[in-house]
Structure formats: C-alpha cells, structure tokens
Image (tube, helix red, strand yellow):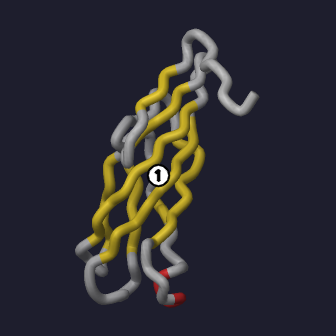
Amino acid sequence: RANRRLERGNVFNSGLNGSFTFKEGFKIVWGEIASASDDLESFIFTSPFKEKCYGVFINPQLADERYSSYVATNITANSFDIDRDDNAGNATINYLAIGK
C-alpha cells in the first residue's frame, strides 16, 4: 500500500515550513525563506534541532543559472547563513535540513 501509518512516537508538522521527527531523534526540517540581501544573511529554522544539524540543502526558486550556487554556512542547531555573493534583487529560497 502507498499509504502507511506513522509509527507511534514520530512527530510530523506539515506545511510550507514543517518538520518530521523520528522517534529515534533523527529530524528533517524544511521551509521557504525570503532573502533580501546580497550580503551574509542568517536564517532561523522553523523547528530547531535538539542536538545538531548535519546539513542544509538549498534550492533557489529562480530559473537563472547564476543563482544556483548558494551554499549554507555557519550551520548550528538553530540557524544557518547564506551569502548570495552579489546576486542582485530579492530571492525566494527553499531549504531542507537534516539533523538530530
């Protein structure tokens, strides 16, 4: 069957900004952020990690290849930074983060 029941103890918060926490503690957090600066910007996770964020995957919502190289840096359990490196204008960015 395509639909399976979640095991007891897992926590799921759906929506544009959401998270899924497995009962063992592993967590996935996703969201959409608006970047208005071409300088270093900090973004706070919609649902922080208890211990550590292992990585953040970035997907800019732009069709222009010059915007495809954003990198998340200074990753903590609560936040991450992005420097758009002088890409002018505002940008909407989706992220997916994993951790515990």
The quadrant holding residue 84 is: bottom left
Q: Nearer the viewer, residue 72 or 90?
A: 90
Q: Nearer the viewer, residue 28 or 74?
A: 28
Taking the spot 58% from the left edge, 10% from the top edge, the residue there is 8
The quadrant holding residue 61 is: bottom left
Q: Is residue 90 left or right of residue 73?
A: left
Quarter of the picture containing the C terminus is top right
Q: Residue furthest right?
A: 1
Dot 1 alpha-carbon crowd within 10 angstroms: few under 14, some 14 to 19, many 20 or more? some
- Figure label count: 1
Q: Is residue 49 above or below residue 37?
A: above
Q: Which residue is mark 1?
A: 75
Q: Nearer the viewer, residue 17 or 28?
A: 17
Q: Is residue 23 above or below residue 63?
A: above
Taking the spot 48% from the left edge, 84% from the top edge, the residue there is 63
The residue under label 1 is which amino acid type? Answer: Ile
